[in-house]
Image (tube, rainbow, N blue to C red):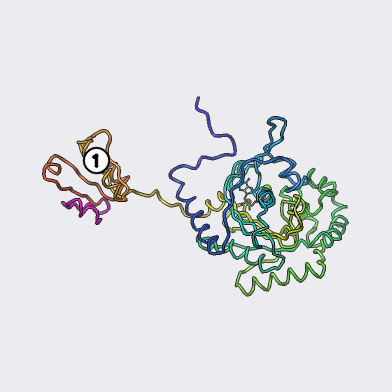
Amino acid sequence: MIIKAPKGTKDILPSEINDWYRIENIAKEIFKKANIKEIRTPIFEDTSLFERGVGDTTDIVNKEMYTFIKSDRSLTLRPENTAGTVRAYLEHNLYRESQPVKLWYKGPMFRYERPQAGRQRQFHQIGVEMFGVQDASIDAECIMIAVELLNKLGLKDLTVEINSLGCNTCRKEYKEVLKKTIAPFLSGLCQDCQSRFEKNPLRILDCKNEECNKLFEENNLRNKLTTINLCDECGTHYEKLKKYLNELNIKYVENPFLVRGLDYYTKTVFEIKSNNLGSQNAVCGGGRYDGLVETLGGSHTPAVGWAMGMERLNSLLDKISGEKIKFYVVSDNQLEAVKLTQKLREQGFGCEFDYNSRKFAKQLEKAAKTAEYAIILGEEEIKNNFYTVKNLNNSEQKKLSFDEVLTL
Ligand code: ATP
Ligand code: MG
């Protein structure tokens, strides 16, 4: 019996790899222009990093972590990369370099979720984290970079949703208001929301459970909920962000009920949604996390970032067809074929030959699938030192010298 890839994981096949390179290459260009440097952190970390960093009232920590014990140490496959980036930032004193420190990452993340379209157990994120700036101009830059990337990838029909969750002070008050409004309906909410009610009532607004959504709708709960009352500082910060976005011509929608799945967000939160994806429609999520560096043992450091789901991005993009190499040598003389292949590769061209000296018709078939030109190297060509080159796009055939082949 053939062993299959574990549930919730997917192979990325050679026919798909160029789609991934496209995202990475466009992102790299944008990050370079913005002076954002790449960081690569380990795929597993101490479990406590995520318990403290992501927060032990989140779904990620409560239900979704791949945790294992080795030599009495509890380790976890990273479910996201912000906590790991902050850990590295502190461990290597990156803050000693001039602020802000702007970093990006890409790679696999692991969450034990129910697999469905747009939701896997091993998936990939590309993301940025920026440390050391309090001003809303960096929140705006952060959103600007995400929007630039999505636009450069050719994605249309996107909605940028923004909100401010305020600081601990504004939030404390809001949590009480929220609890009061929700309390009469509590018994109808899902088990998760019932436990969120005491621990982290804001997260009830982010519940994906259909029953909860129905109950919210039927009782018109969203309209009954007052929106967060921001303190002066948080209010000014949010107004500034909107002014920057307006000036930058970045269209956004304010969603006063946008909270995010992770505990660490303060002030700005945002999500970019595609109107072409089904229920898993968020391609990018992020926000400000001014408390996280301190939570993980550093000194108070304002920070903001985002992460995009690369599988979801890919599902929105046209597929790139497989790339062809330049030459395919068609010959019944393997020695001459491999020698010519070596010469052409030395000159910087992609080249392959037929290893089995099959019939020329068969070799030409393979050449048409593999390359732009077939170089036919038969007895006559070898004897008279020329090459019959067939353009595999238009079937034009020419007799050329080696130097002429190099000009193709
Ligand atoms: P969702 O609400 O869709 O579960 P999230 O709030 O858990 O998202 P984040 O932790 O902010 O998501 O991750 C940022 C992005 O990573 C998401 O917008 C999404 O595109 C992608 N993502 C998150 N979880 C998965 C998953 N299990 N499979 C594929 N992509 C994912
Ligand atoms: Mg999630």
Label 1's element?
helix
- Chain part drawn in magenta: 392-408
Q: Nearer the viewer, residue 251 or 136?
A: 136
Quarter occupied by residue 123: top right
Q: Is residue 378 above or below residue 234?
A: above
Q: Position of residue 138 (x, y in %)?
A: 66, 66
Q: Which residue is mark 1?
A: 339
Quarter occupied by residue 370: top left
Quarter occupied by residue 9: top right
Q: Nearer the viewer, residue 242 or 2?
A: 242
**Residue drawn 78% across the image and 69% down it:** 235
Q: Nearer the viewer, residue 100 or 186?
A: 100
Q: Residues within 10 Å of mark 1 (few under 14, many from 20)?
A: few
Q: Position of residue 79 (x, y in %)?
A: 66, 44
Query: Which quadrant, please, contains the C terminus?
Result: bottom left
**Residue drawn 58% across the image and 48% down it:** 40
Question: Is 384 left, or right, of 407 in this rendering?
Answer: left
Q: Which amino acid lies under the numbered mark 1 shown in the image of this protein?
A: Lys
Magenta includes 60? no
Q: Position of residue 64 (x, y in %)?
A: 69, 41
- Residue extending farthest to the top is 1
Magenta includes 397? yes
Q: Position of residue 129 (x, y in %)?
A: 64, 57
**Residue drawn 29% across the image and 46% down it:** 368
Question: Is 182 left, or right, of 351 in this rendering?
Answer: right
Question: Is 368 left, or right, of 317 in this rendering?
Answer: left
